Image (cartoon, rainbow, N blue to C red):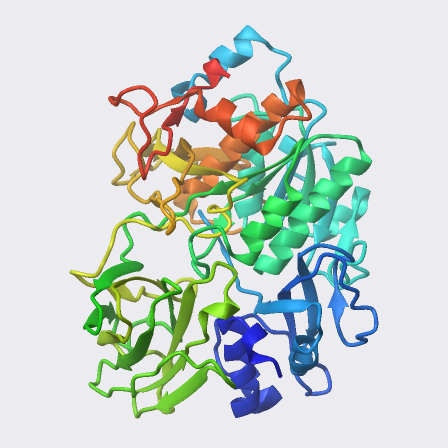
Amino acid sequence: MKYHKLAASIASLMDDLQTQGPLGMLAVAHAFPLAAAADGTAPTVHIFLRCKEKTNFKEMADIRVHQETGKVRTARLPLDAIGALSEHSGVSRISAARELRPLDVASMKVNLPTLRSADPSRTGKGVIVGIVDSGIDCAHPAFAGRIRSLWDQNIAGNGWGTTNYGTVLTGEAMFASNDTNGHGTHVAGIAAGQHSTFGGVAPEAEFIIVKTNFQNTGIADGVRYVFEEAAKLDRAAVVNLSLGGHWDAHDGSDDLSVAIDGLSGAGKIVVAAAGNEGGDPIHAQVKILANKSAEIAFRTVPSTSANAAPWIMLNGWYEGAGSCDIGMRTSAGNTTPMQAIISNGPPTRNFNFPTARVRITTPPAAVTPNGDVQFLVEIRPGLANTRVQGGTWRLLVNNTGNSAVRLDVWSIVPPNAGSAAFQAPAESDDLKVGSPGCAASVTTAAAYTTRNQWIDAGGSPHAVGLTLDDIAEFSSPGPLRDKRKKPDLTAPGAMIVSCLSSKSSPPPASIIGPGLLIEAGTSMACPFVTGLVALLLQARPKATPAQIKAKLQGACAIPGRPANAVDPKWGAGLIDASKL
């Protein structure tokens, strides 16, 4: 086993396999998605591979690599085959798939009617809009006759191309795939739905849909699918990614961001959501002087609470020239030993206490593509509990180097779980744009509030506590960890009316009429920008990501600020479609 090739994520999974066994590890709630093997052997895992451009993996029978060339590829294999793969001379890094999440009248606010009246032919006709999300309601009249194909990554079949999972559907067969979440249908409607009142931005564009498994490997495959299928049609394409996560370094060096940068190009554009953590204390930052220590406190809800977390992950990063020992003090006062960087052998250590189990993973900087140091701290319930113990926990850090280091940490919990909330003075309001929004080629959208009151289909009024005509409080701010500026711009994201999937079950208060749903999030701002990109590609189908981004940002301004101002929350400002 070449441990120096294993990212912290895959090293953690290998430790689970060795300590829990194939069946035991599947019974433990865990942050990394796995698929059980039918015969009880090692589970299957999706991975990213960093390798030489033309490395051939055909001789490795257990490993399904989904692309024949490229420096960043996706693959699927039994977890116990990782050791053999790490021995391959063409492989430089292996990382586990990580689950991202959906990032949950506007056109008037950004002068879209002015654009349409000036040139009614700007409808996105001839352009492909790719939606990589929770699927789509193919029966919704807003999309009638305009869905070219649908790859459902969750339905067992023959997959697509060399990607041997899911199944590709066309024609009537697409109705076998349902959007029970509703997120993808709503997003698709904003980008290019047809409706007399709440129509999308590019109502004559056509769709290629990916119902994703929400693993970052599946998302990368989804982007590749859209672009390759659009190329067969000789069409320009824009892919909408209203999703994201915080497993990465927040500098665009992660596998998904690099994969998207490699797939993007002339007539191949990706738009992503900035994220909805603007008001959430998920990020902490401290500067630790040489030979000094720091404590980063965070609070969790009581384990008896309905939303207590079954696990918590801390994703930490600091400069590659630094050297830190990492420890954890539980809410019950138990403290792990301090753990240095482990350069030889497995970089993980496990510590079991009555109220908690803690795993610390500290691989060297050589493992990461950006040359910095990543560490992971995983917190699970004690053996007698099913949820993480509530109270105040403390991440302990000793800087053992000869110079100061800046340390950034993001807390991650499962969907619908109470957050691991960082406390002052370490809690930081910035650096909350994660992957894929941090990719250099991606246009990343923040959210603006165009409506904060509405009446549902039953006639009941509703309101939310968002400031009208301002950046939405939930919209995640930048910059990136390497100080590059993100998000790129702002578009309407609250409260946005679009298509309702008939297979979903949203709260009645969100349904405003037949087939119509109101939602908020940078997820909603993202497809607004996607639709605008479709309009630009209609006129210039070979435009590059940089050209598209420059054109969009040139039509932006921050209300009340000087021209060309850039802000960590607004980016270049609110888009004015009439200037495109």
Residue 397: x percent and y percent? 26, 74
Residue 285 figure quarter: bottom left
Q: Can residue 472 be seen in this view?
A: yes
Residue 303: x percent and y percent? 29, 78
Query: Residue 29 vs residue 165: left or right?
Result: left
Query: Residue 320 vs residue 6: left or right?
Result: left
Residue 441: x percent and y percent? 54, 40
Residue 319 figure quarter: bottom left
Residue 40: x percent and y percent? 68, 87
Q: Residue at x 34, y 37 (%)?
A: 460
Q: Please identify the residue farthest to the top as the structure is shown.
A: 118
Q: Residue at x 83, y 73 (%)?
A: 59
Q: Is residue 212 visible?
A: no
Residue 464 to residue 46: above or below: above
Residue 17 figure quarter: bottom right
Residue 493 to residue 251: above or below: above
Query: Residue 81 vs residue 119: left or right?
Result: right
Front residue (pair 204, 171): 204
Q: Which residue is drawn at 56% across and 82% down?
A: 14
Which quadrant, please, contains the N terminus? bottom right
Give the tally of numbered discs: 0
Query: Residue 551 vs residue 226: left or right?
Result: left
Front residue (pair 73, 283): 73
